[in-house]
Image (cartoon, rainbow, N blue to C red):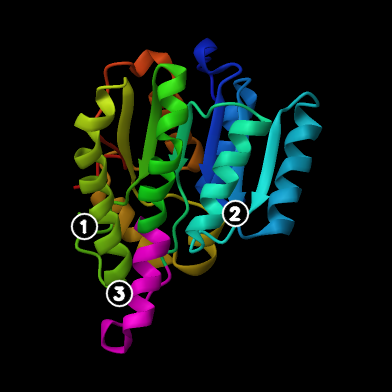
């Protein structure tokens, strides 16, 4: 990971990340650790999470990074972990709601249970994580919340209506919280990534047709990589973005 910008204000801050084991989330974990932040992340994947920590410590032996296993459908467990972080580590300054599941699904075959699960993993826990960290950020005199959106619904992508509906809802969640949280100098923003070349995307959905679509639709033809999203997250988490809130920051190479 080679991001050139340094943000001194992130050094020592406690950053809480959901879905930090793989993909964009793992990039967030590593980039914030390299800035000197104290990073706590949750994920269902234990082996991948511990492997990530080992790789980070190999690069930065003094890294302060912790993992809690959590199924984000279990809201009470999520709240419990956030409370534990306050006691054992300190008040959370930055929350990144990153966890999501974009598994494709045929709308004709979706049951009520399937729908609820899709909305819950892609939207519901965002709300309750915000609710749980709010008082910790008040004690800090402010904070930054970053919600991960998606360009999929902007681009009318089909094959995953539960996911796209939830991700559209993320933007509404961000804007709906901004005024109330702003009273306590808590910023809240959405990052909307384009088609990011994570291992999951490359394994499951990137093919010749996908590559052609990217070539046709991005103004800048370079692939969007996880570190491009992390670069925006670092800025929004730092004090440099102290007056940025209620916004949707799109990082997609200029998708037409």
| Residue ID for mark 3 | 159
Q: Nearer the viewer, mark 1 or mark 2?
A: 2
Q: Residue 25 placed where, x, y %?
A: 53, 45
Q: Residue 109 placed where, x, y %?
A: 32, 88
Give the residue displayed 53% in from the left and 41% down from the top. 17
| Residue ID for mark 1 | 155
- Closer to the camera in the image, 4 or 174: 174
Quadrant housing residue 32: top right
Highlighted magenta segment, given as a residue range: 103-123
Secondary structure at badge 1 equals loop
Residue 53 in the figure: left or right of residue 128: right
Give the residue displayed 60% in from the left and 54% down from the top. 43
- Closer to the camera in the image, 152 or 243: 243
Residue 139 lies within the magenta run: no
Give the residue displayed 31% in from the left and 82% down from the top. 112
Question: Which mark identifies residue 43?
Answer: 2
């Amino acid at each position: 990971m080679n991001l050139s910008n340094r943000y001194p204000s992130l050094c020592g801050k406690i950053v809480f990340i959901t879905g930090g084991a793989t993909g964009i989330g793992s990039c967030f974990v590593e980039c914030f650790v390299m800035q000197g932040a104290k990073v706590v992340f949750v994920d269902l994947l234990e082996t991948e999470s511990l492997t990530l920590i080992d790789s980070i410590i190999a690069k930065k032996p003094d890294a302060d990074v912790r993992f809690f296993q959590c199924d984000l459908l279990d809201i009470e467990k999520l709240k419990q972990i956030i409370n534990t972080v306050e006691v054992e580590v300190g008040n959370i300054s930055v929350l990144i709601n990153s966890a999501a599941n974009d598994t494709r699904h045929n709308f004709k075959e979706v049951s009520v249970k399937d729908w609820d699960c899709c909305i819950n993993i892609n939207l519901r826990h965002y709300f309750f994580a915000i609710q749980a960290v709010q008082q910790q950020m008040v004690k800090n005199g402010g904070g930054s919340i970053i919600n991960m959106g998606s360009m999929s619904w902007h681009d009318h992508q089909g094959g995953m209506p539960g996911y796209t509906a939830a991700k559209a809802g993320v933007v509404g969640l961000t804007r709906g919280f901004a005024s109330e949280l702003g009273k306590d100098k808590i910023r809240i923003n959405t990052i909307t990534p384009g088609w990011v070349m994570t291992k999951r995307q490359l394994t499951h959905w990137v093919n010749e047709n996908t590559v052609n679509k990217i070539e046709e639709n991005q103004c800048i033809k370079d692939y969007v990589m996880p570190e491009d999203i992390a670069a925006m997250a670092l800025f929004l988490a730092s004090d440099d973005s102290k007056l940025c809130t209620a916004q949707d920051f799109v990082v997609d190479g200029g998708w037409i």
